[in-house]
Image (tube, coloured by chain):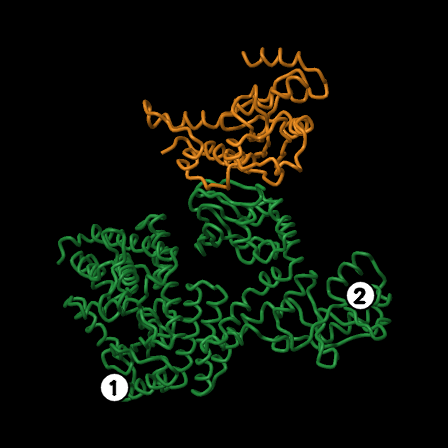
Amino acid sequence: MFRKISTYFNKKGLKDEKYSYLFDEYSGDECVVFDCETTGLNPKEDDIISIGAIKLRGDKILSSEKFERFIKPKKELNGESIKIHQIRGCDLDSAKDIDSSIIEFLEFIGNLPLVGYYLEFDIAMINKYVKPKLGIKLPNRQTEVSAIYYNKKLGLIPQGVIDLRFDSIMKDLDLPFMGKHDAINDALMTALIYIKLQNIRSIS
Amino acid sequence: MSLLEQKTFIKSIPPFEELSDDELDLVCNNLDIEYFKAGQSIIDKDIKEHYLYFIIKGKVQEYAPLDNESISILIKSQFFDPLSLIENRVKNHFKTVEESICYLLPKDIFLRVVYQNSKLEHYFFQSISQKLSQNLTNAQNRELANFMVARIKDAYIQKPLYIESTSSIYKTVEYMKKNSLTSILVKRGDEFGIATDTDFREKVILNRLSFDEPVEKISTFGLKSIKDDDFLFNAQLMMTRHNIKRLLVLGEDEQILGIIDQISLTSFFSSHTYAVANEIDRALSVEELKSASLKFIRIIQSLFAKGVKVRYISKLLSELNRKLFDKLFSILAPPQLLQKAALLVLGSEGRSEQILRTDQDNALIVADDCELSDEQILEFADVFTKTLCDFGYPECKGGIMVNNPLWTKRESAYKKQLKEWIDRKDKEDFMNLAIFVDANCVAGDPALLKNIKNYINSEVENSAFFFSTFASFALIFPTPLGLFNDFKVDKNEHKNELDVKKGGVFPMVHGIRVISLEKRIEEISTVERIKELNNIGEIDKEFASELIESFNFLHTLKLKSSLKKLDLGLSADNYIKPDELTTLDRDMLKDTFKIVNRFKKFLTSRYRLEYVS
């Protein structure tokens, strides 16, 4: 109910009718897993450096149709974030500007549900660019994998503290590490987490 | 950037390390990933999308769809099933053993890369012959390699009968009928084309073409050709690549020798087996039989190298052995004996479970009313045993051969003997009894054996004491598996080796034999006995299939190790070295021994063996 109302007001803000497809109700077994690399952890101040997104159909990860963009930052990369994702300024020479990348991203995701790890942050980062441009926030249905993990784990340790770190979840679910942390690999591994969680009742 | 991991992964798997950078990009850009639950089917007859699967994580089982028999277990970094994609048909099925994650490469991309890259093509089309040529230095395998690297001229080539392209369709069919051909060469100037049965059916009849039209109209020109000294597998390669069924065979001077077709290609290897069987059938003298018998070992090796399952190899070998014994019996036996005796094979030979040529284990039941004297019978038996030794069947160390009076007896004497064995119940007697229970009649009058088996059944019927003593022998050798899931290996003569026969094969064979005797199961081979015991509800389905799988696994392991020992010039025995097994085989061997232990427990509770010392 709440979602319906907020969707309604959100849609009212839409500046360009071309993007009304984002609001179409989706029914099917596809979704999009995505992840952003950023210059920092504050959506208000920091920028997106890269976006990686992968479609899922049932238990299949369509990595052959992935979406990957490196984006020219508006401000200099700081030393801290370079240490984390190892994207240096010079790596972004072939990068595109953020506005066209966001449009391409919207075309890629369409009205598919979105899945991610700490998705709220990535959505906020995307919305930072979408809102001024289209007048809306991403209306797509959103699924947080760490929340599913939490719920399935909770059955086992009702009062326990659950370790929700990405690598801990990967390890606990016995999933193969698919390469270093960058946007597309993290999306890929998040996809694995999501599919595995869909296939198990609880985590032993 | 992100593709780097996929690239490293794919490039680490032979033969994909041969991919060029462009090809590798093509492959990696088209990879999808799929998650499979444990026990989920990946390739079966209902499959709609065709991929080459690379295992990122997990275990996948390849199995035969007919009997669900496991063929192999695939693990991380292995891929399947290239042959089904190349041959465009699903043969074996695949399912996960545990939760698995795979890369999926679409079929068309895979085929494109295979045809583009000559090294990959070579790998996928010629992997068998290549593997064999690597073994060429090895004397034992040389024969086998000869077998596999056969030339075109070794196979059946259809005669090069041809007809002028201006001849009428009617005349052509008439000519084909006269020479019983299914296809015919059509000569147009210097060029040759071909017209086949299919052409007549589809191009003439279905198009209502007049029979008076020249045959040229329905012929296909531009026939591909191959030299007669080329390898057979190259002919196969050409046919697959161009999707054609026939090739023109040319001689040294480009003259046409005939046509080779797909059927004569595929039947070539199997026909060797038939050739030997035929040779036995047609043999009129002991010498001719001997030459046929010497070819057996080659057949076993080549079938094993071709990936034929050990169970079928044993079956085939027993079949050939039996034909040979039967023939030898009919050549050597005095006429009075032919209908008045039954020649038996015993033990593993009787159960069709021997894989390499093992000792002679045979016996003779002579009817009470046979007119020959005991001396005459033994005289024949002696010649029979000696001839088999000459053929290369080693003498049985335990003397279980027809030249031993203990195993060549008149029917009534046998009954007396068997009763003693049943009543005395000491170890040796029981071993003899066990060997006899597995007897199979290969020549002479089978009724003689049937009578005696009925006699055994009536003697042991309802004797719980007999069965529990008999069954207790299944427990005499400990299973070579330690408390901590480690192997217990020999410390003396066979250092670091373990005896798979005592440790695994014997307890299963014997236990199953005892239950089968109790339930009067007529099947003799262990696997068939297990299936029958499952049918009558004595063993549940899951346990039955576990037992069969374990049994087959032990047999395969034994054959592998025996062939290896023969290669090294050692004698084949029942010992294997766990350290030399692959991790997977080691794990499976452990699982197998666990099943053996479970089976022993099953016997213990069924026959109350805890009370039998």
* Residue that appears at 54% across and 11% down: A2
Residue B147 position, x and y percent, is 53, 75
**Could you tell me which secondary element the residue under label 2 belongs to?**
loop
Q: Quadrant of residue A103?
A: top right
Above or below: residue B430 compared with residue B70: below
* Residue that appears at 67% across and 57% down: B116
| Label 2 Cα crowd, 10 Å radius (few <14 / some 14-19 / many 20+) | many
Q: Which chain is orange?
A: A
Determine whether label 1 and label 2 are within 8 Å by CB.
no
Q: Which quadrant is the N terminus of chain B positioned in?
A: top right
Colour in which chain B is drawn: green
Q: Quadrant of residue B154?
A: bottom right
B109 left or right of A60 in image:
right
Q: Determine the chain carrying the residue at label 1.
A: B
Residue A198 position, x and y percent, is 47, 31
Measure the C-alpha gap from mark 1 to mark 2. Answer: 72 Å
Of residues B21 and B463, the one drawn nearer to the viewer in this rendering: B21
Residue B228 position, x and y percent, is 67, 77
- Amino acid of disc 1: Asp
- The residue to which callout 2 is attached is B219
- The residue to which callout 1 is attached is B374
B355 left or right of B41 in image:
left
